[in-house]
Amino acid sequence: NAGVTQTPKFQVLKTGQSMTLQCAQDMNHNSMYWYRQDPGMGLRLIYYSASEGTTDKGEVPNGYNVSRLNKREFSLRLESAAPSQTSVYFCASSEFASGSLTQYFGPGTRLTVL
Amino acid sequence: TQLLEQSPQFLSIQEGENLTVYCNSSSVFSSLQWYRQEPGEGPVLLVTVVTGGEVKKLKRLTFQFGDARKDSSLHITAAQPGDTGLYLCAAGDTNAGKSTFGDGTTLTVKP
């Protein structure tokens, strides 16, 4: 099993350009998430999808859109990139077991907006 | 939203030393998790604690959940350079289907 995969691994954009970050999981999890991580900080939730066909805003949704394409895939789109969106983006999926949510993370996409 | 405060933010120690990092909140958790993130990678789950007062051991790592389920600690004995990384605590909101993460403790263990 590959777990959670993300593409691309690195990306450089100019201000105003758009792009889509792709994420897929092969663990048959219902829930998927997009986080951003800035230097020296933890993870901030951008959007999440509790199940196929649903999406909800997290802490920092402004400037982003998401699509839950099917159970496996959850994409994050930046319509008009800004330097403040320079960050490392992590996708995750989760399972609910023994009363807790366990999250499995992808390797991240390192995005620089010039 | 449950706010998780981790301390210290940064910790730099010599190989062989012991250390403890903390995760605190004013809220009661149903469960709490510790993740470790190595440079250039995504976080990986270390442990989940669910019962107040619970202690779990993972080799040289000891995790404790407070009796009131509002705080947790991670103790590392005889730290090694391979322990270097960012340690994150997380509390899950199972009703909402999402987790809140602390800002993490960045640990550097020097040889």
Image (spheres, rainbow, N blue to C red):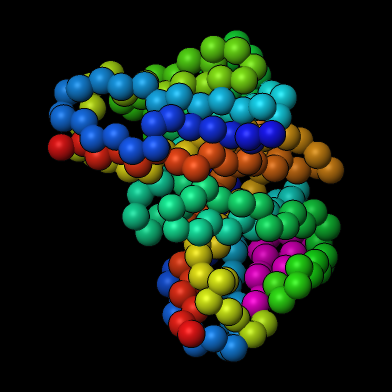
Q: Within the magenta stretch, is there residue B69?
A: yes
**Where's residue B63, x and y in %?**
72, 68
**Where's residue A94, x and y in %?**
67, 35
**Where's residue A84, x and y in %?**
24, 39
**Where's residue A96, x and y in %?**
76, 35
Q: Residue at x 63, y 23 (%)?
A: A50
Q: Residue at x 59, y 64 (%)?
A: B23
> Residue placed farthest to the front in the image?
A1
For the N terminus of chain B, the image quarter is top right
Q: Is residue A54 left or right of residue A28?
A: left
Q: Is residue B38 visible?
A: yes
Q: Which residues are magenta?
A: B62-76
Q: Is residue B97 left or right of residue A92?
A: right
Q: Residue at x 47, y 46 (%)?
A: A43
Q: Is residue A46 left or right of residue B66?
A: left
Q: Is residue B66 visible?
A: no
Q: How many marks?
A: 0
Q: Quadrant of residue A93?
A: top right
Most common secondary structure along the magenta stretch: strand
Q: Quadrant of residue B36?
A: bottom right
In front of the other: A19 or A99: A19
Residue A74 in the image: above or below residue A60: above
Residue B92 in the image: above or below residue B80: above
Q: Residue at x 65, y 70 (%)?
A: B74
In front of the other: B95 or A103: A103
